[in-house]
Image (spheres, rainbow, N blue to C red):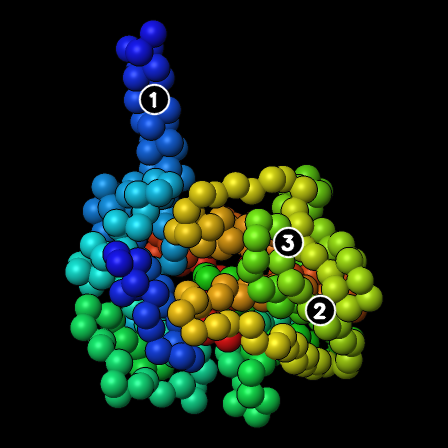
Amino acid sequence: MKSRALVSFLVLSLTVISSANAAAPLGPPPTVKSAFTNVKGQLVKKISFGRGCDGQTDYPHESTHFPLTVNVEALTECPGEEVSITTTISRSRWWIFNEAKSVSAEGFQRVKVNVSLPCKWKIGQPPILYVVISHHSDSKGAQQNTETKARIKC
Amino acid sequence: MLQKRWHEFPANFHPEFNFHKGPFWLRALARTPILERFAYPIAMKKGLCELWPSSSESILDPNFDATEWVIHTREKNDLERWIEGSLAYLAHGERNRSQQFFFRDRVFRVKNNQILFRGVLPRFSFTSYGRTLRRQRGIHRANGTYKKYKKALRGEHFDFSE
């Protein structure tokens, strides 16, 4: 009985490790050294970043203008088109019960939102994980998401 | 104790742990629940931990012990931000119907000013590194740019205007 339990444990452990390895070969993005090199550091002849319509989400940070708040900015821009954005900042808590706040905005060509949450960090605690997700769209129906996260003592 | 060093970084800088640049066993360790905590000190010793400024105004605290960290003085460029998922280019027709259904984050309104993003497919990961990978892949799958993301990681040439 004991040996069967031991074998089951070993098989389970190997499965966890092998599945982790199978999912890991790409890894997180290697960083490039400059705009003219690719992720392996090789020279890139041509990089084209689309038609000027993009959405981006900055990193959440502790606000300098409004102390004790964590703040994040996000924007959508597209020349000559109506654009919209919905940005949600969430503070990681127990399991799925995160605290979240969302802001939406619409505008012509360029729209920017600023979302903030009051700080809850206390001395002695580890930094709190903040995750920001933005949903960008334009009047032609293109939709993209962006996401950032940061651990902040706030 | 082991977790403490890699959790200590200056405000307005964010860390990135490049386990993929390390040996195979380190990646496996970083993705093993409970034992993952032992992977971070090893990654620091191997120079795989980087600190990036959160904005152009970020200044590194002179009292910060930068030993074993790789400190960047400039923000990430557009390509790096696109790969990590914080920058996206609005494009049409990159997703087929099944991709649109399975990979797009659904928006659920909780209150007037509170919404949640949740995908159709469940996404599980039991380690911090696994969650980072899951988020990156999730964003690119939702955006229909997963193939380009993989190409970028392999270092292949690709063109956003395709």
Q: Subunit of mark 1?
A: A
Q: Are marks 3 and 1 on the same chain?
A: yes
Q: Are marks 3 and 1 in contact (CB under 8 Å)?
A: no
Of residues A56 and B133, the one nearer the viewer is B133
Which of marks 1 and 3 precedes in the sequence?
1
What amino acid is labelled 1 in the image?
Answer: Phe
Q: Are marks 1 and 2 in contact (CB under 8 Å)?
A: no
Of residues A120 and A88, the one nearer the viewer is A120
Q: Disc 3 to disc 1, how far (Cα)?
A: 32 Å
| Residue at disc 2, secondary structure | strand
Identify the disc placed on residue A102: 2
| Number of marks in the rendered image | 3
Circle 3 crowding by C-alpha within 10 Å: few under 14, some 14–19, many from 20: few
| Residue at disc 1, secondary structure | helix
Please indicate whether residue A79 sits to the left or right of residue A48 in the image: right
Residue lying furthest right:
B112
Foreground mark, 3 or 2?
Answer: 3
Residue wearing tag 1:
A9
The image quadrant where one finds the N terminus of chain A is top left
What amino acid is labelled 2 in the image?
Answer: Ser
B39 up-or-down from A46: above or below = above
